Amino acid sequence: MALVTEWVNVTDNISIIARESGEVWFKTRTGTKEGLDPFATPMTGVGAMGSTVGLLDGAINLGFATIENRLARPDLTLAGYIVALVGCYHTTVDSPRNLRRAASRFKELGRPEVATYLEERAREETGHDRLALKDLRALGVPAERLVANFVPEGIKPLCKRFDDLCIQDYPIGCIGYSYCLERIAALKQETDIEKVQAMCPDGVDVTRFLRAHSSLGSEAAHVEEAIDFVASLPANDRIRVVQETYESALIMAEGYNHELLKSEAEILKELEQALGEALPYGPSRGAVLGPRHERNSAIEAGT
Ligand SMILES: [Fe+2]
Ligand SMILES: [Fe+2]
């Protein structure tokens, strides 16, 4: 049987092309003579896991590539980690409700298989916001007050994107958004978790959220399930999911970079303003534990 080839136009002039065998190409359409480009028209065939994952991961790489050269690479600090946990709380607290809303819309649309998938996702994600709260409490931070008063600037557009996607008339894009966040979280390794834990006193566990949203937690399985499900969707749906994965990666890359570019003094000021009191921590003194940046950073949020 011939190998499956899939393609999606993610910008006005860039297409991602992926084969079932794992090869991925980024094709610019500029200069192609009209009528000669077989990828100019939307794909209509079936998907396959090997090609679908190529499109999805290609979309994330393309989204991050737009800011790759100006990515912030600050050192990991407790204050920065606290902000990251607040971000994690906000990107997860409404996920189950949003996913259920999208699920009920797919039920109305006569797509029970999509509804069932989203309902299952909602169940899996329930309670993940509480992991972030527990980690904040373990750090001695008044967690509820902090998250009530503070949404990191760079996280706001991400939260808004998911809210908007889930209330659309045809909310298939929410699967692309979730894939983007989960795929990036699943890149985190044990060493990323150890670096965070090393900043904290022995016996204080501040990595519940991070562990659950890493290669050690359920995230790797969620990613596999998502690829399997997206590959089973009709071509039009796969196109929209991949396009939204790209849009979400762009928003995520910009947002995280915005947060990571802040100095520790700025971060502490923001946190203290939100809390109305000083943090239990002052500026870090030599707490340099390696870079926190990019897709496998220990600091980034997941779903
Ligand atoms: Fe997940
Ligand atoms: Fe989660």
Image (tube, helix red, strand yellow):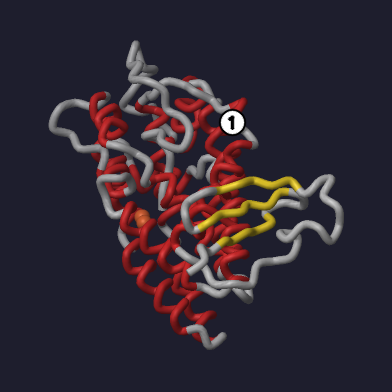
Q: Quadrant of residue 201?
A: top left
Residue at 57 percent of width and 66 percent of height: 238
Number of numbered discs present? 1
Dot 1 amino acid type: Glu
Q: Secondary structure at mark 1?
A: helix
Near-viewer residue (121 or 76): 121
Q: Position of residue 295 (x, y in %)?
A: 46, 37
Near-viewer residue (271 or 49): 49
Q: Residue furthest top?
A: 286
Residue at 48 percent of width and 69 percent of height: 1
Residue at mark 1: 68
Q: Position of residue 233 (x, y in %)?
A: 51, 73
The quarter of the image that holds ligand 2 is bottom left
Characterize the local packing of mark 1: few (<14), some (14-19) or many (20 or more) Cα atoms within 10 angstroms: some
Drawn side of residue 300 relative to residue 157, left or right: left
- Above or below, comparing residue 172 to residue 74 in the picture: below
Q: Residue furthest left?
A: 203
Instruction: Decide if residue 98 is in sight here.
Output: no
Residue at 31 percent of width and 27 percent of height: 280
Residue at 58 percent of width and 61 percent of height: 6
Q: Residue furthest front?
A: 1
Near-viewer residue (223 or 255): 223
